[in-house]
Image (cartoon, rainbow, N blue to C red):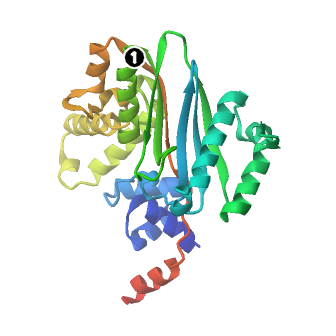
Amino acid sequence: MISASLVKELRERTGAGMMDCKKALEATEGNIDAAIDWLREKGISKAAKKADRIAAEGLTNILVDGNEGVLVELNSETDFVASNAQFLELLNTVTKALLTSGVTTVEEALKTTVNGSTLEEVLFNATATIGEKITLRRFVRVTKADADFFGSYVHKTDAKITVGGRTSALVVLNGGSSEVAKDMAMQVASMSPTYISRDHMPQDVVNKERDIQREIALNDDVLKTKPENVLNGIVEGRLSKSLQDMCLVDQLFFKDQDKKIAQVLKDANATVVSFIRYGVGEGIEKKEDNFVEEVMNQAFGK
């Protein structure tokens, strides 16, 4: 039996209707990832990114010193607390501690000493004082070579937030300049690429997307009557467009829509070594108190 909570999660991740989500889960025996593909193949959903529908709160932050940089996500329960001066001070303290400690995992980080207390104790005390659960969800340490540039960007949506922001991106650029590196960080933050280029994309990702695009075409009454070579050409064209949005170098430059990132990098004699992007709450499911009521309303037309 497919649970209401599973239907809810699929609905949030795809934007498809409740009954379509239920059918997809039944057809895939409750496998939510397979259900997403099923909906896409039927033309019901475009499998919108889950990050766009997540409502967990908190802030991300970046701190760079020399060849070392850290990208951090500190979570709170509400956005009100996330803009609280005490939370902002805590975020600043945590970011500095992570940069200087040299640790690479959350488990190690919680054991590090901050002003005479472990970071775990600091977060526990902050939770007690602020009145909301405060957690260090994740962080990443990035090291660059002497000749490389760090590009960092922290997107702020509230003037009251003096430290950190909802979305942050940290890029390592070989060649170019600090200005180009900053542009790349802004591009990553705003356009959410998954890979640097097709060369960095696992073949199984390409194959899976090709299969999905082929199923979509075969479910089209007009396209499925096309000769095989024509159908294959259409599938490959759609595949290329679909994968383009995932690859940084294939995206249009946010400052100049007539240029792709590949051209911007070529003009600057630069290459992107790596990038990391954090958006607050990615992968954390928001509690919906009125989901049962919503289901009842849809089922009985209220």
Asked if 294 appears above or below 194 in the picture, the reply is below
Front residue of 277/180: it is: 180
Front residue of 205/163: it is: 163
Which quadrant holds the N terminus? bottom right
The image position of residue 198, as x and y in percent, is 39, 26
The image position of residue 99, as x and y in percent, is 65, 30
Front residue of 220/266: it is: 266
Image check: 43 left or right of 297?
Answer: left
Residue at screen point 54% across, 40% down: 61
Image check: 292 left or right of 108?
Answer: left
Which quadrant holds the C terminus? bottom left
Asked if 266 appears above or below 165 in the picture, the reply is above
Which residue is the site of mark 1? 271
Residue 6 visible in rendering: yes
- Kindly indicate the quadrant of the structure image that contains residue 44: bottom left
Residue at screen point 46% across, 85% down: 296
Asked if 205 appears above or below 298 in the picture, the reply is above
- Kindly indicate the quadrant of the structure image that contains residue 42: bottom left
**How many badges with numbers are in the image?**
1
Front residue of 214/70: it is: 70
The image position of residue 265, as x and y in percent, is 32, 18
Residue at screen point 35% across, 28% down: 183
Disc 1 residue type (three-letter): Thr
Residue 2 visible in rendering: no
Element type at mark 1: strand
Residue at screen point 65% across, 41% down: 93
The image position of residue 176, as x and y in percent, is 36, 14
- Kindly indicate the quadrant of the structure image that contains residue 219: bottom left
Image check: 64 left or right of 229?
Answer: right
**10 Å neighbourhood of mark 1: few (<14), some, or many (≥20)?**
some
